[in-house]
Image: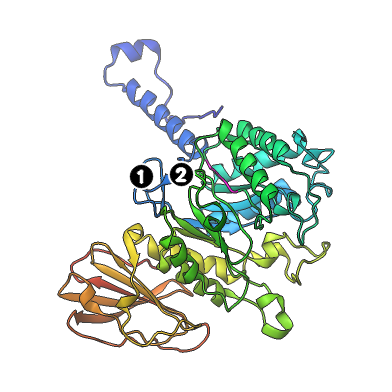
């Protein structure tokens, strides 16, 4: 219950004044109190809208049809390794940077069944998926509710994949088709009423055999037995789409893919592949190049991934036609701290890693896209008429269905020659948008009959730029960095 004190500068009128003096606006007092109560409810108690698939089956929207920009963060060990104060710190930081959804796991990867959480609690009783530990799940509840309070959705993985297919993980394998269904039902009964959830079974695994498929499908069946509202997708291992395994399953609402933490990855190819599959689904790049991760898992030989890698992966994905993008940081996913063993050479305290530049620069990307009807864009590589090799310099382009703007990206500062006649315009205005700082620079006006070459002012790795070309009569305004 929210108690609101309404300050009145003069003494409240007595009963005789209220009824005898019509000039005293008692209704105004009541109205103001109601307004404050409504505002308080909006800030603290309003549920987030349920997410659904757009009518064209390519994007995510709210239940009212409003565009939803999936800007995610992988915080796989958030539930397992963080106190509530740390949860508040992480979620607050991601909210301030424009994130909209956080991907995390209930039964976590790093020996999440046997190593207790920050409050000494394990998730299951005797590692039995049909018996959950209420004390552990109260912390899960806190994470979900705190995210909702901040306006964030949770992409919730019921379990990491090593609990049904150990492979390279710690395990132990505790699932079979029977208890997986019961576990799914337990989760659905508990969280069906939470509007800010998307279900993501899988947990970095390809199903290896028939039993794995049976376990996954049984868990999904359990979820859907008590929850027919929330969207469901699947989180695979690297270089694979969810639809590679579950394309014919009716429960797969949208596609996901994961890359391999390598500068050699070509994210756009996976978006194109997903977009070519029937039935059409939205596709999310759910685990791309992680900032501060050893490139190709070997920092000594290949260096470390940085904010430049984040930007390339993100713009490649979005302009190829993805419905969203999930940022990852090697230190943050594992909630690395000096008193914990680093996984794959993690080297920065996760609280300090919150300040790495990549996540902030994705806020600039989101601001740019949301300045346009971005869900009405289509990837069109024929816009780029100059040489465009599919290597680290590969340029991507997307154009509005209304043909009144186009957005192009050059990851290494290579000059771009776009076909301006693709736009339904006579004259256009061109801008450079700097993805490092969110600033923009007007280049000039051009006739669409011209074939100009647009050359950024720097060249090489880290010198990526976004070229924005707009019909001169359109009223789109590029975002301005207020920092």
Residue 81, compared with residue 313, is above or below; it is above
Q: Position of residue 325 (x, y in %)?
A: 50, 61
Identify the disc placed on residue 57: none
Residue at 62 percent of width and 69 percent of height: 290
Q: Quadrant of residue 347?
A: bottom right
Residue range of the region highlighted in magenta in the rendering: 196-200
Q: How far apart, in angstroms, are the residues tagged by discs 2 and 1?
A: 9 Å
- Count of numbered circles in the view: 2
Give the camera-side residue of 169 and 475. Answer: 169
Residue at 68 percent of width and 60 percent of height: 333
198 is within the stretch colored magenta? yes
The answer to whether the residue labelled 2 contacts the one labelled 1, judged by CB atoms less than 8 Å apart, is no
Residue 311, compared with residue 222, is above or below; it is below
User: Is residue 50 visible in this depiction of the protein?
Assistant: yes
Element type at mark 1: loop
> Which residue extends farthest left?
426
Q: Which residue is mark 2?
A: 51
Q: Position of residue 197 (x, y in %)?
A: 55, 43
Q: Which residue is mark 1?
A: 65
Query: Is residue 45 toward the left or the right of residue 28 in the image?
Result: right
Query: Is residue 45 toward the left or the right of residue 397 in the image?
Result: right
Q: Position of residue 207 (x, y in %)?
A: 66, 54
User: Is residue 138 visible in this depiction of the protein?
Assistant: no
> Which residue extends farthest front?
210
Disc 1: CA contacts within 10 A as few (<14), some (14-19) or many (>=20): few
Residue 292, compared with residue 386, is above or below; it is above
Q: Quadrant of residue 405?
A: bottom left
Disc 2: CA contacts within 10 A as few (<14), some (14-19) or many (>=20): many
Element type at mark 2: strand
Residue at 33 percent of width and 64 percent of height: 378
């Amino acid at each position: 219950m929210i108690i609101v004190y309404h300050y009145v500068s003069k003494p409240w009128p007595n009963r005789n004044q209220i009824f005898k003096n019509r000039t005293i606006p008692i209704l105004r007092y009541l109205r103001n109190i109601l307004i404050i109560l409504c505002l308080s409810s909006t800030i603290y108690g309003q549920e987030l809208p349920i997410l659904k698939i757009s009518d064209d089956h390519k994007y995510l929207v709210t239940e009212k049809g409003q565009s939803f920009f999936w800007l995610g963060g992988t915080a796989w060990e958030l539930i397992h390794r963080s106190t509530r104060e740390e949860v508040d710190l992480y979620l607050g930081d991601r909210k301030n940077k424009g994130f909209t959804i956080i991907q995390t796991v209930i039964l976590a990867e790093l020996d999440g069944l046997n190593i207790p959480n920050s409050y000494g609690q394990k998730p299951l009783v005797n590692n039995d998926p049909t018996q959950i530990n209420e004390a552990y799940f109260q912390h899960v509840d806190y994470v979900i509710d705190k995210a909702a309070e901040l306006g964030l959705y949770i992409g919730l993985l019921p379990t990491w994949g090593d609990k049904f297919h150990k492979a390279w993980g710690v395990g132990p394998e505790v699932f079979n088709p029977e208890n997986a269904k019961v576990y799914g039902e337990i989760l659905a009964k508990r969280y069906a009423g939470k509007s800010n959830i998307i279900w993501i079974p899988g947990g970095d695994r390809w199903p290896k055999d028939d039993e794995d498929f049976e376990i996954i499908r049984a868990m999904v069946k359990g979820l859907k037995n008590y929850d027919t509202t929330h969207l469901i997708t699947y989180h695979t291992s690297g270089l694979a789409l969810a639809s590679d395994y579950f394309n014919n399953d009716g429960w797969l609402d949208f596609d996901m893919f994961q890359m391999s933490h390598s500068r050699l990855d070509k994210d756009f190819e996976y978006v194109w592949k997903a977009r070519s599959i029937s039935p059409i689904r939205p596709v999310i790049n759910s685990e791309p190049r992680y900032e501060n991760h050893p490139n190709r898992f070997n920092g000594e030989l290949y260096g470390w991934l940085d904010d430049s890698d984040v930007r390339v992966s993100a713009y490649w994905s979005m302009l190829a036609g993805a419905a969203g993008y999930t940022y990852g940081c090697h230190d943050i996913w594992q909630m690395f701290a000096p008193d914990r063993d680093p996984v794959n050479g993690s080297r920065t305290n996760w609280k300090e890693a919150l300040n790495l530049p990549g996540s902030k620069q994705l806020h600039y990307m989101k601001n740019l896209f949301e300045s346009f009807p971005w869900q009405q864009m289509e990837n069109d590589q024929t816009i780029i008429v100059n040489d465009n090799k599919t290597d680290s310099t590969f340029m991507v382009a997307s154009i509005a269905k209304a043909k009144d703007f186009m957005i192009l990206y050059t990851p290494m500062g290579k000059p771009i020659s776009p076909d301006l006649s693709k736009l339904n315009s006579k004259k256009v205005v061109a801008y450079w948008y700097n993805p490092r700082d969110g600033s923009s620079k007007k280049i000039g006006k051009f006739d669409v009959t011209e074939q100009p070459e647009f050359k950024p002012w720097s060249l090489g790795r880290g010198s990526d730029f976004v070229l924005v070309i707009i019909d001169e009569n359109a009223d789109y305004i590029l975002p301005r960095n207020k920092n």
